[in-house]
Image (cartoon, rainbow, N blue to C red):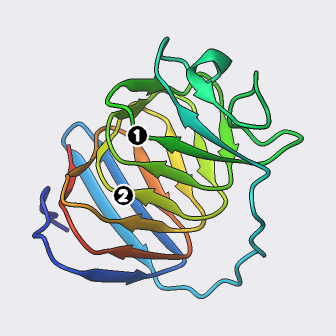
Amino acid sequence: MKMRTHFPNHAMKIRSAALSIRSANAVRRLALAGLALSAAPLFAATFTSTWTGGSPNWSTVANWNTPGAPGTFPNNGGSTYDAVFGVNSTVTLDQNIEIQKFTMSTGTVTGNFGLTTKELFTWSGGIMNGTGVTNANGGVSFSGAGNKDVNTRTLNLGGNSTWTAGGIRLG
């Protein structure tokens, strides 16, 4: 199946149990499975961490502002985290990361490790890069006028996802 690498700016609702967007060099695939799966119950995260920049590694605690839990970075271990990435910089996934929610409005997430969200991934702009896999188990809200780029990274969508604005580009 041929696939366009830029989608027009209009509203779209994706209802699927699994949507996989993979972009690797010249190979572009879009697989959609319309299977109904029961969702796990959603829980509020214990902490919200905001990326402040600095060295590129996700696990560097100085790069995160986490009120109530200083000296931590978002990764579900004992506590749960929502992560906000809104700085025009690059963050490198230097280990597998599992969080509740992820909000991305600009910048680049890259690396060979995985990023898993249990709840909604809100994506209004920026780039997902590297050879790792992003598992958005709570679905994705594609919003905002900016482009959302997936370059050489696999993005797996679970649950319901919505696309209300901006472009989704695969490169």
Quadrant (top left/top right/bottom left/bottom right) for the N terminus: bottom left
Cα distance between the residues tagged 2 and 1: 23 Å
CB under 8 Å between callouts 2 and 1?
no
39 sits left or right of 165 in the view: right
Quadrant of residue 167 in the image?
A: bottom left
> 105 or 159: which is nearer to us?
105
Whether 50 is drawn above or below 39: the answer is above
Label 2 CA crowd tier, 10 Å (few <14, some 14–19, many 20+)? some
Residue 113 is situated, as x and y percent measured from the top left of the image, at: 57, 31
Task: Give the farthest residue toward the front.
Answer: 67
Q: Residue at x 84, y 44 (%)?
A: 79
Whether 104 is drawn above or below 87: the answer is below
Q: How many marks?
A: 2
9 sits left or right of 115 in the view: left
Residue 119 is situated, as x and y percent measured from the top left of the image, at: 63, 64
Q: Secondary structure at mark 2?
A: strand
> 63 or 114: which is nearer to us?
63
Q: Residue at x 79, y 51 (%)?
A: 46
The residue that mark 1 highlights is 86
Residue 12 is situated, as x and y percent measured from the top left of the image, at: 27, 81
Q: Secondary structure at mark 1?
A: loop
55 sits left or right of 171 in the view: right
Q: Residue at x 79, y 37 (%)?
A: 68
Quadrant (top left/top right/bottom left/bottom right) for the C terminus: top left
The kind of residue on which mark 2 rests is: Ile
Badge 2 or badge 1: first in the primary sequence: 2
> 162 or 157: which is nearer to us?
162
The residue that mark 2 highlights is 21
Task: Give the farthest residue toward the right.
Answer: 78
